[in-house]
Image (cartoon, rainbow, N blue to C red):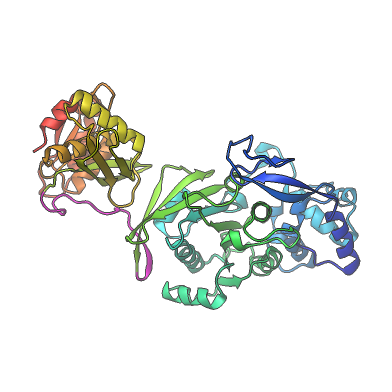
Amino acid sequence: MGLAFSKPARAYRYCLLMGKSKQVFACSACGSVQTKWQGKCPDCNAWDSLVAERIETKVKVDPRAGAVSSWARNARAGLGSGLGSRSSFGSGSGLAGMADELGLPPSAHAEAVAMAQASAARPVTAVDAEGGAAGRRIATGITEFDRVLGGGLVAGSAVLLGGDPGIGKSTLMLQAAGALARRGTRVLYVSSEESAEQVKMRASRLGAGDLPELFVLSDTSLTRISEQAARVLGEVDDGPRRATAPVMIIDSVQMVYHPQVDAFPGSITQLRRCTAELVFMAKATGAAIMLVGHVTKDGVLAGPRLLEHLVDAVLYFEGDRYHAHRVVRAVKNRFGSTLEIGLFEMTGAGLTPAPDGALIAAGTQGPPRPGTVVCPVQTGTRTLLVELQALTATGFPGAVKRKSSGLDSSRLAMLIAVLEQHGGLRLADRDVFASAVGGVRVAEPAADLALLLAIAGAHYRKAMPERTCAVGEVGLGGEVRPVSQLEARLGEAARLGFERVIVPWGSSKQAPHALAGAKGRAKAGARALELMEVRDVNQAIALLG
């Protein structure tokens, strides 16, 4: 990558890069490198995960130099006030000697100096985190997506998005690209799986087919992608019209290959090298880069785990392709919280933000049904009312089933044990199935009481009182424990028309402003919110029916 020098310089650079090579074995699960093949990785204990690859042992030039060579050549050629000449490459003096130390020809001196300036050491007092390029937020305008990112993309960051095939990853990325371009941000959308004409058809359907700031490239070579990024994004200036850094989207990184790596696209070697160079490009130029990745049959990102450590944020796009609702979840975010989720609904015009999720309002689901309980769940700064469902059926002793969807299976097993020991239910010969409706995964302990009541209601064929929800943590002794952020939970329940909430004993004293705040948020004309406090699971089960 970045070998577009004169012929003598190109040959010289090639000789520097191509040193002696040796064969090693890299783990596809954790990315560790071993000198010989083994049946089990000694670092992560994964079986049959070591794959052979060749590495260069004598490389006198930083292998990441190729990632920004095109940008540096733009700066050397004086192409306007592009990214290559911006302060995003750093500043400093006495760095010109680095090119001589590397033994580079004179034509490559400017490139080495630009790269050296990007990593110049500065006092922490001289770093302008807010005013610099790397500190600016780039809001996409898609509220749910910005919420997960922590307020928008950060200039100079790399974001990895994964999800099942057909879930809508490309749709989300193209909508984000269109929203950014509509706000004046120059965006380069690189598709390694579709032609430019196919991307244009989808962009027109999503209302982004007539945006002059949105550029489309269909290519798989990282060298050509870098050159086009330098041409398209390197023309962005720092004037008032260009208040944000440019953005590049690669869909998907598994199909991108590096010409200097002797491996097929999608292999561990290619993924690691291409991702490392793209991340380095983002840091050196100040551009924000979003990568789309494939997932395995287990639902984790394909490739070595090292990819998740290289990037700044890892997002998962979840949901059922046969249902409308989708969830964007952050499992890693260096610039924001990992507790936030983004809710979308798939429509004919693309993904539409759904801030209220499935919008479970009281009275809209018909009469109460046995085995169904609504719980106010806290996800970051947002409160969602999630419907939890349970079903019990006759099973075979010793071979009963405990199945859950969107819930913690170990938590479900614990609650079944509590019901048998302290609630008087006999479930040893009953199959138990539990689910969270709406595609939201519920993992917090505050949903214990609602799930327990759903199982008990399904077993006794008793339903919850109308317009009633429940929240509380259940201990192993059968006691019901208080939960955090009760005011926000009660306020959302009152806003959606619920009139009673089953809560742990002492909740009104623990949070004296919770009830008053909930009453203030209640719908006009609604009855005052009533707190039904319980000490243990027996008192809670007695409220059924």
The secondary structure that dominates the magenta segment is loop
Q: In this picture, is 524 found above or below 506?
A: below
At 77% from the left edge and 67% from the top edge, which residue is drawn? 78
Is-magenta flag for residue 364? yes
Query: Is residue 460 left or right of 135 when viewed as pictured?
Result: left
Say if residue 325 shows up in the picture: yes
Query: Is residue 114 left or right of 457 when viewed as pictured?
Result: right
Task: Please identify the quarter of the rendering in which residue 411 is found.
Answer: top left
Quadrant occupied by the C terminus: top left
Quadrant occupied by the N terminus: bottom right
At 19% from the left edge and 49% from the top edge, which residue is drawn? 496
Whole-percent x and y of residue 381? 36, 43
Whole-percent x and y of residue 356? 29, 53
Q: In this picture, is 448 found above or below 116?
A: above
Q: Which residues are magenta?
A: 348-367
315 or 508: nearer the viewer: 315
